[in-house]
Image (cartoon, helix red, strand yellow):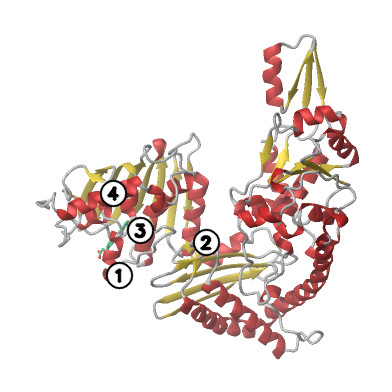
Amino acid sequence: MTQITQRYDADQIKILEGLEAVRKRPGMYIGSTGKPGLNHLVFEVVDNSVDEAMAGHCSEIIVTIDPDNIVTVVDNGRGIPIDVHKETGLPAVEVVMTTLHAGGKFEGQGYKVSGGLHGVGVSVVNALSEWLKVIVHREQKQYTQQYFRGVPKQPAGETIQFPKEGTGTTVIFKPDIQIFEDLEFTSEVVDHRLRELAFLNPGLKIIFKDTRYEEVLEKEYCYEGGIKSYVEQMNENKELLFSPPIYLKKSRDSYEVEVAFQYVSDYYDEQIATFANNIRTKEGGTHLSGFRTALTRVINAFAKKYELNKEKDSPFSGNDLKEGLTAVISVKLPNPQFEGQTKTKLGNSEVKGIVDSLVDEGLTDYVEANPKIARNIVNKALIAQRVREATRKAQELVRRKSSLESTTLPGKLADCSDSEPANCEIFLVEGDSAGGSAKQGRDRNFQAILPLRGKVLNVEKARLDKILANEEIRSLITAIGPEAISGLREPDRFGDDPPIEQTTAQILAKLRYHKIVIMTDADVDGAHIRTLLLTFFFRHAREMIEAGALYIAQPPLFLIKKGNSKRYVYNEKELETVLAEIGRDNVTLQRYKGLGEMNPDQLWETTMDPEKRTMLQVNLEDGESANEIFTILMGSEVEPRKLFIEKYAKTVRWIDV
Ligand code: 0RA
C-alpha cells in the first residue's frame, strides 16, 4: 500500500485550483462545451494511449461508448507509473490525472507529448467528468483510483494483486452534465478519428465499440500500410493514373517524414490531408510546402531530362501538379509549433527543408525506377497547364463583365431595389414559368429572382473553363458577385501555398445578396437541378456555404381545403397528421407538382414571405463526407453511384409520384 501523508499541502491546493480553472473556463481547454468539445474528451484520452504506441510500447487500443455515454479507453501500454512523485508526495498516476500539463513532466523518460489541437492532457478530461476511474496494470499489480469532478474519491495508490500477465491503462469516464450542453458523443466523429489514427500509426490496432443503440457498432482498424492505405481508401472507386500509391518514409534526427500520394485520372480536384504528430493540420504549413516544392522540382527535372515538355517549354507550377492529386503527409517532430487562424498550420521552419530534401531524394529514385508512371504524371500536368491558360482567359472575361457592375447584370435577373446586400435575397428558380410566378409574388424591395433555364451544367464532370463558358453559370456568378466565388480567385503565383481563405465577413462583403435561395420544384427534375447547383457551390464557393449564405426554399407539397379553411402542407408525414386531425370528409386535396402551378400570391404566402416560410440553411457539417457523396453522385463512375442509390433507396420515402 502506498501511503499518502501530505494531502493538504501547497501542492494539493495548487491542484485543486487548476481543476477549478478548467471547470470555470472549459472552452479555454477544449474549445467548446458543445459537441466538438465533448467528442474531444475521447480524443484527449486516446491521444495518451497513442503516444504510448508511438513510443513503441502499445499495440492495441479499445474505445467503447456505453449507454449513458460512459466512455472506456483501454490500452496495453506500460501503464501510467504509480511510484511516488517527489515534489508532491503523490503517486505519479494521481499527478497525471489531476495536474494540468502533467504529461510534459515525463518527457525526459521518453514520453512523447503529442499535444492534440488543444493538447491539454487527461487531467482536463478528469476535471470535466462527473466521475473518472483509472485502472493501471503494472508489475502484476492493479492500481485503481476514482475521481469525482477531478477530485480523488479515495486515497490514491490502493493496489490489489493482479493475477494476469500484461500491462496497460484503462480510463473510464462520464462527462459532467453541469459542463456540457448534452452528453451524446457523436459516433461517426469518434469512428472517423480512430480510423485516421490507425492509418497514422501503422500496425496499431484500434477497436471502436458503440453499444448505446440496439444495433451495436463494432469496428476494428489496423493498417500495416499506414498512410499508403489511407490514400487507397480516399481513392476508393476512382480511376487511377497508377497504383499502388507512391510511398516514401524517411527519418532524420528526431524527425520522421511519411508521404503517400497518387493521381486520379480525369479528375481535377486535389485532396490532401496533412498531419503533424497525428494532429490534422487543416491549414497546411511547412510540411506541405516542402512536399509541393520537391514534387514540382522532381517532375520538372524529369520532364526536362527526357524532353517531355518541348511544345511550351515553360516549367510546371505547383498548381499544374495539383489536379487529381490525392496525398497524405504525416510528420513526427519534437516541439511542433501550430499557427494560423485555427492553430492548425504547422509553423516549424526547419520542417520545410527536411521534407523537401527527403521527398526529393526518394521521389528522384522513384521516377527513375518507374519512368512510365512519371511520364503519366508529366502528361497530366501538361494538360493541366494548358487548361489553366484557357481558364485564365475565361476568368478574365467574367471579371471584366462584372467590373462594369449593374449594366452587365444578366438580362433575366429581376433585381431588387434595396442595394444593401445584408437585406437582400436572391431566389434561383427553375424555368421561366416558375420564374414568372416568383417575380410577381416577391417583395421587390429586397427579393431578386433569377430564372435558370434548362439543366445547369454538371460541374463535377466539367473543367473550370467549360463551367465558365456555360451561360447559366455565368449569369449565376455575375448576379451573386463573382468575387465571392473562391474558385474564381487569382491562383497563387507559386502554387506552394494553399488558397487564401476568406473570412465570413470578407465573403459576405463580396456577395450582392446575403441570402441565396435555391427554389426548385418538388419533383425529380427539381431535385436534379438542386443537386447540380449545390455541387457547383460546394466545389467553387464552399466558403459562401460556410458563411451561411446558401438556403433551400421549402415550397408546400399539398393544399388541403375544407369548407372555407385551407392549409398548406410541406411533407407527407405532415399530411397524415393534418388529415387525422381534421378528418378526411369533404376535403379537397391539391398536390403541387411545380412552383408554376401556384399563383404568385400562394407562392409568396407559402414559400417566400419571411414571416411565414421555412427555409433550410445549407451547412457543411462534414466536408469530407459531403465531398465523398458528391463524388459518388455527380462523378463519372457509374458503379458506386448505383450502389449508393441501392443502399439509400430504401430510406427515401418517395422520389416522384
Ligand atoms: C508517463 C510515463 C510513462 C507512461 C505513461 C505516462 C502512460 C500514460 C498513459 C495514458 C494512457 N495510457 C498511458 N500509458 C502510459 C512511462 C512509464 C514507464 O517508463 O514504464
User: Mark 2 or mark 1: which comes first in sequence?
Assistant: 1
Secondary structure at numbered mark 2: loop
The image shows residue 11 at horizontal and vertical percentages of 18, 55
Q: What residue lies at 20% left-to-right and 55% top-to-bottom?
A: 140
Residue 170's label in the rendered image is: none
Q: Amino acid at mark 4?
A: Leu
Up the image or down, 305 lies above or below 634; here it is below
Residue at disc 1, CB closer than 8 Å to ligand 1: yes
Residue 23 sits in which quadrant? Answer: top left
User: Mark 1 or mark 3: which comes first in sequence?
Assistant: 3
> In the rendered structure, are the residues bearing label 4 and label 2 in contact, judged by CB atoms less than 8 Å apart?
no
Up the image or down, 618 lies above or below 56; here it is above
Residue 48's label in the rendered image is: 3
Residue 110's label in the rendered image is: 1
Is disc 2 surrounded by few (<14), some (14 to 19) or many (20+) residues within 10 Å? few
User: Mark 1 or mark 4: which comes first in sequence?
Assistant: 4
Q: Amino acid at mark 1?
A: Gly
Residue 341's label in the rendered image is: 2
Is disc 1 surrounded by few (<14), some (14 to 19) or many (20+) residues within 10 Å? few
- The image quadrant where one finds ligand 1 is bottom left
The residue mark sitting in front, 2 or 1, is 2
The residue mark sitting in front, 3 or 4, is 4
Q: Is residue 226 visible?
A: no
Residue 19's label in the rendered image is: 4
User: Mark 4 or mark 2: which comes first in sequence?
Assistant: 4
Q: Is residue 518 left or right of residue 236?
A: right
